[in-house]
Image: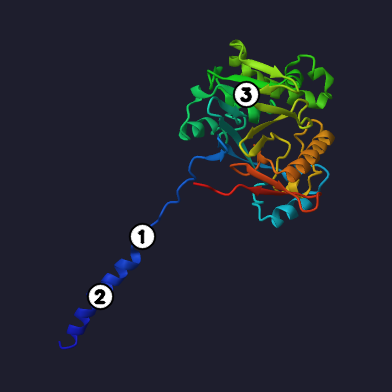
Amino acid sequence: MTNLKPLLLILPLGTATLTAQAAEPTTIQAEKQVAGYYQYQAGDIQITALLDGTNFMSPSLFKDITQQQVQQILKKYYADQDKGVQTSINAFLINTGKSLVLVDSGAASCFGAHLGSVLTNLKISGYQPEQVDTILLTHLHPDHVCGISKDGIANFPNATVYVSDDEAKYWLDSKQAAKLPKEKQANYLGTVEKIKQAIAPYQAKQRFKTYKLGDDIQDFKVINTAGHTPGHFSYELKTKGESIVFIGDIVHSHTVQFDQPETAIEYDIDPKKAVETRLKQFANFAKNGQTIAAPHLPFPGIGHIYSADGKSYQWIPIHFKD
């Protein structure tokens, strides 16, 4: 009987140990990324960068460069390679103090549910769509124009939409499709359908207007940067001590096309001219130091272009300011 006492003391301790081992581990769930907007002060002008979403492109879309070379460039810049070549889709809201101007508008639902956050982020940033009085489109590709309306209703009911006359003629002239190679006509007509749906509410109210080189719109100077599309234009706004250029699609990748700026992309309608435009503008921006706002560079897409040798370039993002 004397040997039972130690056994009785051990049993409860062993039971407790087994119970602890069987308990479920605690799981802390990861949180989702917050909404995307960033406010940048340029002199007396406030620019709000609005993220529409992040997209990934196949390396095969880049011309005159092997996929292996693309992968090497991505690796050099520590860029994520798992899904392809990353690109942002950004729009920019400019508060001049007397006007609220939106440059490009995102893709809305034209390319899937992973895009289409411009309108939401605009509201979260403290503004309302009704306050926007001017929309400047760099060109009419759906990831720039689709965000201006939804289901036949204008998202910005008090805004007038501007695009270059050359761009409007290319996409809205009914005779244009017949001029294209047959293998490109279906894609062209599909794009035209999306464009027409987006701009229809503004056309109905005579709020869709075109301009020509030399025109100024709400103090923005228009710059001909054709190549990506025939009527692709960029917009320059000068403020106190700073010049900001909203460059549109003269570049799609902050890695591939800065390291190898001669590389065109499948989306360019005139690849040769697109490359010429990029080389000319990059050299100008690197020399003169303009602040750049780009729809397809990593959010917020605002920064500067630097070149050490005049041949390859680097994207220098702005530093975060609170």
What residue sits 36% from the left and 60% below the top?
Answer: 24
Place residue 249 in its image quadrant. Answer: top right
Secondary structure, mark 1, is: loop
Please state the horizontal and vertical placement of residue 73, each as a whole percent of the image: 74, 53
**Is 159 on the left or on the right of 275, as rendered?**
left
* Residue 296 in view in this figure: no
**Amino acid type, label 1:** Glu
Q: In which quarter of the image is the N terminus?
A: bottom left
**Is 144 on the left or on the right of 169, as rendered?**
left
Residue at which label 3 appears: 218
Residue at which label 1 appears: 24
Residue extending furthest front?
A: 240
140 relative to 205, above or below: below
Residue at which label 2 appears: 13
Q: Nearer the viewer, residue 26 or 102?
A: 102
**Amino acid type, label 3:** Gln
175 relative to 78, above or below: above
Place residue 55 in its image quadrant. Answer: top right
Q: Which one is earlier in the sequence, the residue at label 1 or at label 2?
A: 2
Q: Label 3 to label 2, Cα distance in Å?
A: 80 Å
Q: Which one is earlier in the sequence, the residue at label 3 or at label 2?
A: 2
Q: How crowded is mark 3: few (under 14 residues within 10 Å), some or many (20 or more)?
A: few
What residue sits 60% from the left and 11% below the top?
Answer: 204
What residue sits 62% from the left and 32% below the top?
Answer: 111
Please state the horizontal and vertical placement of residue 80, each as a whole percent of the image: 64, 52
**Amino acid type, label 2:** Leu
What residue sits 19% from the left and 87% below the top?
Answer: 3
Please state the horizontal and vertical placement of residue 178, each as a whole percent of the image: 82, 18
* Residue 54 in view in this figure: yes
Q: Label 1 to label 2, Cα distance in Å?
A: 20 Å
Secondary structure, mark 2, is: helix
Q: How crowded is mark 1: few (under 14 residues within 10 Å), some or many (20 or more)?
A: few
